[in-house]
Image (spheres, rainbow, N blue to C red):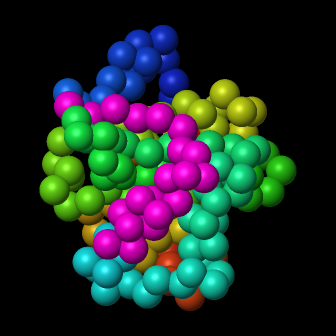
Amino acid sequence: MTSCVFNKNMHRKLELTEGYTWRRATNADADAVQEVVFTVLKEYGLPVDKGKTDMDLMAPADFYADGFFGVIENKERAIVGTFGLKEHEKGIAEIRKMYLLSSCRGKGIGHFMMRFLLFKAKELGYQTVMLETASVLREAIFMYEKYGFVLDENAPFTERCDKMYYLNL
């Protein structure tokens, strides 16, 4: 697996695009968070599964209490992006529910979310991060590979995701 190198100047790259802010999500954000995630899933023809895969979005602050779940807001304070980190197993964190509305893409926000989650994983003591994704999310996969994530060819598939990536911190 590839390693991610953190240096003392990387914190400068944790600046968010002007007009957008981030914050930790609360359970009161559940409806808006679901709207963002489900909109993006539908955009790519991926199924919504409120009963299983997406149950974490019903109470995000509770589900991610031992990790992190954040939202990106635009200048009108509408939630336009989501990004989460949860323990997968000892020493390994999973990046979850990293979604951004199409109108907000191409502005560096996805890179902010990725860098934030990598720093958060390191801060929480994880040695490795992993994520699951779907082949149709080509732009996201390009970004993951740019950050050094390596495809696990032997990973089992889930209902919505057919790829799994790892990165050693």
Residue 57 appearing in the image: yes
Q: Quick check: 22 above or below 132? A: above
Highlighted magenta segment, given as a residue range: 19-39
Q: Examine the image and state in which quarter residue 100 appears.
A: bottom left
* In the image, residue 36 lies in the stretch drawn in magenta: yes
Residue in the image at 47% along x and 63% along y: 31
Q: Which residue is outermost to the top?
A: 8
In the rendering, at what x and y percent does residue 121 appear? Answer: 63, 38
**Circle count:** 0
Q: Is residue 94 left or right of residue 62?
A: left
* In the image, residue 109 lies in the stretch drawn in magenta: no
Q: Is residue 52 left or right of residue 143?
A: right
Q: Which residue is outermost to the right?
A: 90
In the rendering, at what x and y percent does residue 44 appear? Answer: 29, 79
Which SS type dominates the magenta stretch?
Answer: helix
- Nearest to the observer: residue 133 or residue 63: 63
Residue in the image at 41% along x and 13% along y: 9
Q: Is residue 53 left or right of residue 72?
A: right
Q: Examine the image and state in which quarter residue 14 appears.
A: top left
Say which quadrant the C terminus sits in. Answer: top right
Q: Quick check: 157 above or below 117? A: below
Q: Examine the image and state in which quarter residue 75 appears.
A: top left
In the rendering, at what x and y percent does residue 12 appear? Answer: 36, 16
Q: Quick check: 89 above or below 76? A: below
Residue in the image at 51% along x and 29% along y: 5
Residue 111 appearing in the image: no
Q: Is residue 78 left or right of residue 10?
A: left
